Image (cartoon, rainbow, N blue to C red):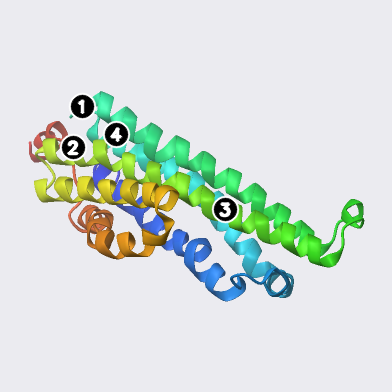
Amino acid sequence: MHDNPGRVAGLWYLLIVLLGPLRLIYIPSKLFVKGNATATVSNIAAHQWLFRAGIVSDLIGGVVLVLLVLAFYRLFRGVDQNLAVQVVIFGGIMPALLYFISVVGDIAALAITRGIDFLSVFSKPQLDALAMFLLVLRDHQYTAAEILWGVWLFPLGILTYKSRFMPRFLGIWLILGGLSYVALSLTAVMFPAYQDKVFKISQPAMFGEIALMLWLLIKGARPSSQAGSART
């Protein structure tokens, strides 16, 4: 395993894929009621451990994301160190910071649902609205994060294409996925009514990351120098 940095990166990628849907998809579908702050707060209060699990998954996800991009740096630094550093910055450090910032909002929303003495000057509907605002604010953080989810795929895709120890089609697929995320983020800001339509159109391009993860897990990857020394 240690002599195959591609497989190490694949394992970290798998962990990200397993953790992500909990807070991104499952918890919102189970607890959040669109346009109804009171019902949403009641659901969070009744299922606090599920909501807390989402917070923990984000904390772990932020750490794992940094470990993932460091594994990619190890894999691709011999191809182009400048691009490999961009992968670390845009794909690891910056989005990980957004993970932790988002957690602060979730913890604040949870605290409001549990009741805080110094907020007793506000009425229950006002507190519910404040908690809902914090949760909605997180959606806007996703819009910002989507730019990073896209931008980091450009250097990663170029590195994959240039590497000669990874299939070139994966590199092209990753770049298309990067364009899709950037388009989705900009659409959310400029033309929000078309966001769902852009998402449906761009979804196939986003599967490039899943294809990369599966390739790394199944086939692994070694820089050319390591592959040559492994055969001797």
Q: Where is mark 4, residue-wise?
A: 74
* Residue 158: mark in rendering: 2
Looking at numbered disc 3 in the image, what kind of residue is underneath it? Arg
Is residue 192 shown above or below 89?
A: below
Marks 4 and 2, Cα distance to the nearest angstrom?
Answer: 16 Å
Q: Earlier in the sequence, mark 1 or mark 3?
A: 1
Q: Where is mark 3, residue-wise?
A: 138
Looking at numbered disc 2 in the image, what kind of residue is underneath it? Ile
Where is residue 24 shown, x and y percent of the image? 49, 62
Q: Where is mark 1, residue-wise?
A: 80
Marks 2 and 1, Cα distance to the nearest angstrom?
Answer: 9 Å
Where is residue 139 shown, x and y percent of the image? 53, 55
Secondary structure state at the residue bearing disc 4: helix
Residue drawn at x 20%, y 55% as measured from the top left: 215
Residue 92 falls in image quadrant: top left
Residue drawn at x 60%, y 70% as measured from the top left: 32
Secondary structure state at the residue bearing disc 3: helix
Q: Earlier in the sequence, mark 4 or mark 3?
A: 4
Left or right, 219 with respect to 125, comes to left
